[in-house]
Image: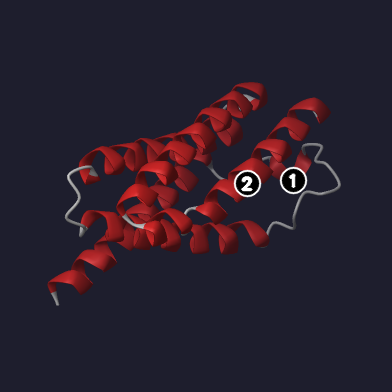
Amino acid sequence: MKNLKTLIISIMIPILVGLIGSLLGNSSMGFDIINKPSFNPPAVVFPIVWTILYILMGISSYLVYVSNSKNKNNALRVYAAGLVFNMLWTFFFFNLKWYFFSFLWIIVLIVLVAVMIYRFVKISKLAGYLQIPYLIWLIFASILNFSIFMLN
């Protein structure tokens, strides 16, 4: 029962951080009127993808948290830093409309996530592998971000 509670909390943390980021960024406010590349997904895709990614992040962090690894605290610190960077990107991109700065910010986030995956894999291969869709999505998002910067 304790592990189930820990798993639920682990999943809720990234979901809540995502929700806070969404509220801080007024997520799609003004997004409809900016120029977007032809490969920009429909708006309905983003909340679906992010919900799945946040759930995977939570499961992954749970696997690291319950491990007996002496390196889990360092790995979870990188994970937490990544969550903060993720949340702040939304604010920079949507609220401030700092498209180029947001692009640079997401590159740092990609590096953080790559480091996190590396550290997670050393603790739990599954925990690291569950983060790969997140990394792929961030790479796509960075291309989308840069394209929006170029078009606006």
Is 136 in front, or is 89?
136
Q: Which residue is mark 2?
A: 28
Q: Which residue is mark 1?
A: 32
Amino acid identity at mark 2:
Ser
x, y (%) of residue 26?
54, 43
Contact between marks 1 and 2 (CB within 8 A): the answer is yes
x, y (%) of residue 123?
30, 51
Quarter of the picture containing the N terminus is bottom left
Residue at x 38% of width, y 53% of height: 14
- C-alpha span from label 1 to label 2: 7 Å
x, y (%) of residue 27?
57, 45
Amino acid identity at mark 1:
Asp
Quarter of the picture containing the C terminus is top right
Q: Is residue 49 left or right of residue 86?
A: right
Residue that protrudes farthest toward the left in the picture: 2
- Across the whole image, how many numbered discs are drawn on residues? 2
Is 135 in front, or is 14?
135
Q: Secondary structure at mark 1?
A: helix
Is 84 in front, or is 43?
84
x, y (%) of residue 65?
23, 55
Name the quadrant containing residue 75: top left
Q: Is residue 107 left or right of residue 124?
A: right
Residue at x 28% of width, y 44% of height: 76
Q: Is residue 99 left or right of residue 20?
A: right
Badge 1, how many Cα within 10 Å: few under 14, some, many 20+? few
Name the quadrant containing residue 87: top left
Q: Is residue 58 left or right of residue 102?
A: left
Residue at x 72% of width, y 31% of height: 146
Q: In the rendered view, tell whether residue 10 sits above or below residue 135.
A: below
